[in-house]
Image (cartoon, rainbow, N blue to C red):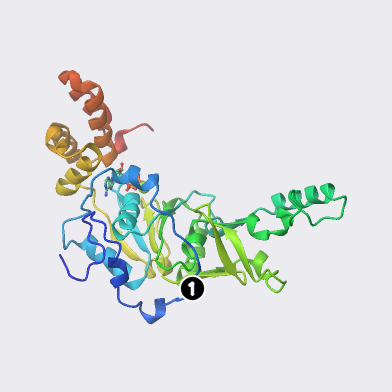
Amino acid sequence: MSEWFIYRGTGDPDPERIDRRPAPPPWRDFGAPPIDYRVPEADSATTRRLGTRAVPLAVPGSEALRLINAALYLRRPLLITGEPGSGKSTLAHDLAFELGLGRVLQWPVVSRSELRDGLYSYDAIGRLQDAQLARLEDGEGGGNGPAGGPHPAGDIGRYLRLGPLGTALLAAERPRVLLIDELDKSDIDLPNDLLNVLEEGEFTLPELERVADRPGQQTVQVLTDDGLRAPVTGGRVRCRAFPVVVMTSNRERDFPAPLLRRCIHLDLAAPRDERLAAMVQAHFGAGSYDEYIGLVDRFVRTEADGGVRPTDQLLNAIYLVQHTAGRHPADQEAVADLLMRPLDNGPR
Ligand SMILES: Nc1ncnc2c1ncn2[C@@H]1O[C@H](COP(=O)(O)OP(=O)(O)OP(=O)(O)O)[C@@H](O)[C@H]1O
Ligand SMILES: [Mg+2]
């Protein structure tokens, strides 16, 4: 194993390793002053995907580990391509788990996604309704809330919610892991729009910039993607440690060269051998790989037909065999055949 690796893909958590990185290159040094924000622990999205046991991502010294670590050192986003089910999205969770970086911020991209969705949303209508309610309650006087205190509509931060990208750029002490999942499903503009934010590590909220000179409004507590509140000063969010950004793609389309230039590209091969064994054991316990080696062989062997074989098919087949068909050995074959079909031969 190379000494310089921060992420080792062994699945053994070591939260201190990330702090041993050298200082960022000057062109990736953002260094905003730290804010008071407590990052939540990993949630069930991570444990569901990783299972119960540490899984080595790749054989030590492999190209994948080198590329991932290069991205960590250079403070650059990782762009991960690969077949469906090769473990692209789970890699973000694995990074967060091993480096102790807490809850993974997830942005599932769809064709309608815009940059603004990832950064923040402003519930102007909700605020207007609350303000109208306040006027009714106070006979047009306004100003007081239900318990006689200031009315919620006066607190603009309650109506501003940072999205996953916006939250990842908060100046927390340690970097967050941000998964921008299936970027290739986006509208043609999104990859270009992302460029600037990923390059500058900051963005503004005009709604807050406008009120920043009013008394008490210089720093506003806004909602975050974690469901917590975080201070934003002067309407500007700027990162301290650049987040660990994992962008995934099923190669449904190409990305513009300026985006590719700013990312580290990793093509993740489908898991086989040790990595597949580790995944099976992560979800079904030690010894399960040997117990279900028949199914594993079948899964790997049928790959020779050239079809796409997502790991989930094997995991699903093992689960079903374990819980139902296992009692009837003949069914084992039938279940395997039904579930483990190449995707390209699937429903049209
Ligand atoms: N490190 C890992 N540990 C345990 N299980 C894993 C790991 N990586 C992947 N898996 C399992 O493999 C399956 C496929 O992984 P994942 O969903 O990340 O693939 P993907 O490449 O993102 O697929 P898609 O392109 O369809 O989104 C999941 O069920 C996941 O639980
Ligand atoms: Mg995925």
Residue positioned 48% across, 73% down in the render: 200
Image quarter for residue 222?
A: bottom right
Q: Is residue 323 above or below residue 313?
A: above
Q: Do we see residue 163 in this rendering? A: yes
Relative to 222, is 235 above or below? below
Name the foreground residue: 309 vs 127. 127
Q: Which residue is mark 1?
A: 200
Q: Which sits in the foreground, 73 or 196?
A: 73
Q: Residue at x 32, y 70 (%)?
A: 19
- x, y (%) of residue 114? 55, 56
Q: What kind of residue is marked 1?
A: Glu
- The answer to whether 187 appears left or right of 319 in the picture is right
Residue 153 percent location from the top left of the image = 72, 55
In the image, 150 versus 168, the foreground residue is: 150
Q: Secondary structure at mark 1?
A: helix
Give left or right: position of 39 versus 24.
right
Q: Position of residue 103 (x, y in %)?
A: 41, 54
Q: Residue at x 28, y 72 (%)?
A: 20
Occupied quadrant, residue 115:
bottom right
Q: Name the image quarter holding the C terminus.
A: top left
Residue 308 visible (yes or no): no
Relative to 287, 26 lies left or right: right
Residue 46 locus on image (x, y percent): 36, 48
Question: In the rendered view, does 251 fall on the left or right side of 239?
Answer: left
Work out which quarter of the rendered image holds the N terminus and state it.
Answer: bottom left
Question: Which of these two is toward me, 148 or 80?
Answer: 148
